[in-house]
Each structure stands twice: as structure tokens, then as C-alpha cells.
Amino acid sequence: MMDFISIPLVVGIITLGIYKLFDLFVRKKERLAIIEKIGDKFDSSMIENKFSFPMKFEVGGFGTLKAGCLLLGVGLGLLVGFFICQAYVYGSIPKIDVSHDAYEISGVIYGASTLLFGGLGLLIAFLIEMKYRNDKKAE
């Protein structure tokens, strides 16, 4: 179906992996050099009272909310894509010839609806998070 994109995609992924590997080694060397420069000027009294233990941690990360809304959106997108394909591609409405074109169109419908509703799920998670943070600031 998408043979024209598979070879550039594989080459791009391999190139990105090699680039990130070299970038990792270069950044490690840079960080070690910075630590050596700062190490001479550093004094332990600088951080004596900054990290004492009863630390206040922010409770309630929103990672679970984001993942849940994303999966809910993807599932809803697949469901909507299924209903659209049943109604227009394979249904009683004679819009197209049911052949190879129907397979291509159904793939586009599934992909577009999954991405659309997945993005909407993440947008809803963001709005819920912002509402929660604004309510917490108002208190």
C-alpha cells in the first residue's frame, strides 16, 4: 500500500538514531567539562538549607489523565471511522466503486478520525489540567 514511503522512513529512523547516539556522547563530554569548571567554585554551604526534608511534593500528576484522554480519543476515533466506512464506503450509498479504492479510502478515514479524536482527547486533558491549576491558584 505505502511502499513508496517505507524505504525513506527506515533510512530516516536509522539516521536519526545514529545522530542521537553521537549527540548523547557529545553532550556527556560537555556536561563533564562544565561540572569540572564549576567544581572548583562550588561550596557545600551553598545548598545547606535548600534541600531539607520535609519537602513539599506536588501531588496529582496529569500523566494518567493525558494517557486516558488520548486512549479514549483514539478509541472514539476508530469507532467513528468504522461507522463512516460502513455508511459511505461499504454501505448502501453508491459513492465509489467498492474495490481497491474502497480500501484506500477506508485507510484514510480510519487514520484521520483516529488522529482527530486523539488530538481532541489531548486538548480536553489540557483544558481539564488548566482548569484544575487555575482553581488551585485561586484557593
Image (cartoon, rainbow, N blue to C red):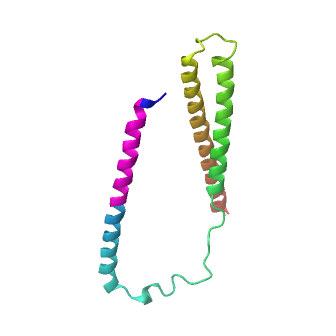
Q: Position of residue 56 (x, y in %)?
A: 62, 75
Comparing 97 with 79, the one in front is 97
In the picture shown, does residue 30 fall above or below 90? below
Comparing 136 with 32, the one in front is 32
In the picture shown, does residue 67 fall above or below 139? above
Residue at the spot x=68%, y=63% of the render?
A: 139
In the picture shown, does residue 22 fall above or below 106? below
Q: Is residue 8 magenta?
A: yes
In the rendered image, is residue 134 in sight?
no
Residue at the spot x=39%, y=53% of the render?
A: 17
Q: Is residue 27 magenta?
A: no
In this picture, which residue range is highlighted in magenta?
Answer: 4-22
Residue at the spot x=29%, y=79% of the render?
A: 37
In the rendered image, is residue 48 in sight?
yes
In the picture shown, does residue 58 fall above or below 96? below
Q: Main secondary structure of the magenta part?
A: helix
Q: Is residue 44 left or right of residue 54?
A: left
Q: Is residue 129 left or right of residue 42?
A: right
Report how many numbered discs are placed on residues in the image: 0
Q: Quadrant of residue 133?
A: bottom right
Q: Position of residue 74 (x, y in %)?
A: 63, 40
Residue at the spot x=63%, y=43% of the render?
A: 121
Q: Is residue 89 left or right of residue 17?
A: right
Q: Position of residue 98 (x, y in %)?
A: 60, 14
Q: Quadrant of residue 107?
A: top right
Q: Position of residue 28 (x, y in %)?
A: 35, 69
